[in-house]
Amino acid sequence: MPFEIPQDLHPDLMPLAWLLGRWEGRGHGDYPTIDKFEFGQQIDFSHNGKPFLHFVSQTFVVGEDGKRERPLAMETGFWRPRPDNKLEVVLAHPTGFAEIWYGEIEGAKIEMRTDVVARTATAKEVTAGHRLYGLVKGELLWAYDMAAEGQPLQPHLWATLIRA
């Protein structure tokens, strides 16, 4: 079924309309402080008629049969397009940190960087991030570079998702 822009979509969201819906697929992770791994992922972008998208990402361990075995990470937040193809994103993680991101929308490509990372006393020391999202041949590709646990900003996660 082809993607259709909802009639009640706020006009400010038109530059992000291509993200709407549920995306599912597989990804990879790597970082100096952990072993390489693969994961399954589901991302939902939704709206309620106001000028922001609600974002929920859930990752999980996938068994050899392709079924979800157990949850991994989760994040939720709001993507707020601004004039001149700018973007503000606020994300929260159940592991005790929250981030403010600023970026730019260039057609079906988004690039953003953290401005602020706030942590609780028990959260992992995440200090910076850089993310890319793009629609390539109908697939959502994304990559996340992270600075954490005393390590410099470097590749951490990347995935390819299809619209569910």
Image (tube, rainbow, N blue to C red):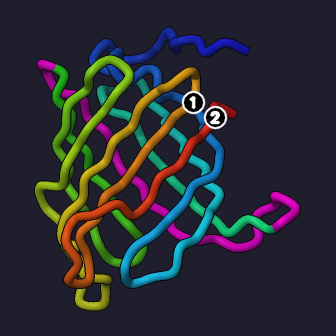
Per the image, the residue denoted by label 1 is: 139
Q: Is residue 65 left or right of residue 28?
A: right
For badge 2, the amino acid type reads: Ile
126 left or right, relative to 68: left
What secondary structure is marked by label 2? strand
Name the image quarter holding the N terminus: top right
Q: Are marks 2 and 1 in contact (CB under 8 Å)?
A: yes
Q: In which quarter of the image is the C terminus?
A: top right
Depth check: 75 or 152 in front? 152
- Indicate yes or no whether the magenta region holds residue 75: yes
N-terminal of the pair, mark 2 or mark 1, is 1
User: Which residue sits at x=19%, y=49%?
Assistant: 113
Name which residue lies at 19% across and 22% down. 85
Which residue type does callout 1 highlight? Glu
Residue holding disc 2: 162
Instruction: Please name the predominant secondary structure of the magenta segment in the image.
Output: strand
Numbered label tally: 2
Percent across and percent down for residue 140 are: 52, 34
Magenta stretch, residue numbers: 64-84
- Work out whether 112 lies above or below 82: below
Q: Position of residue 54 (x, y in %)?
A: 42, 41
Q: Does the magenta stretch include residue 140?
A: no
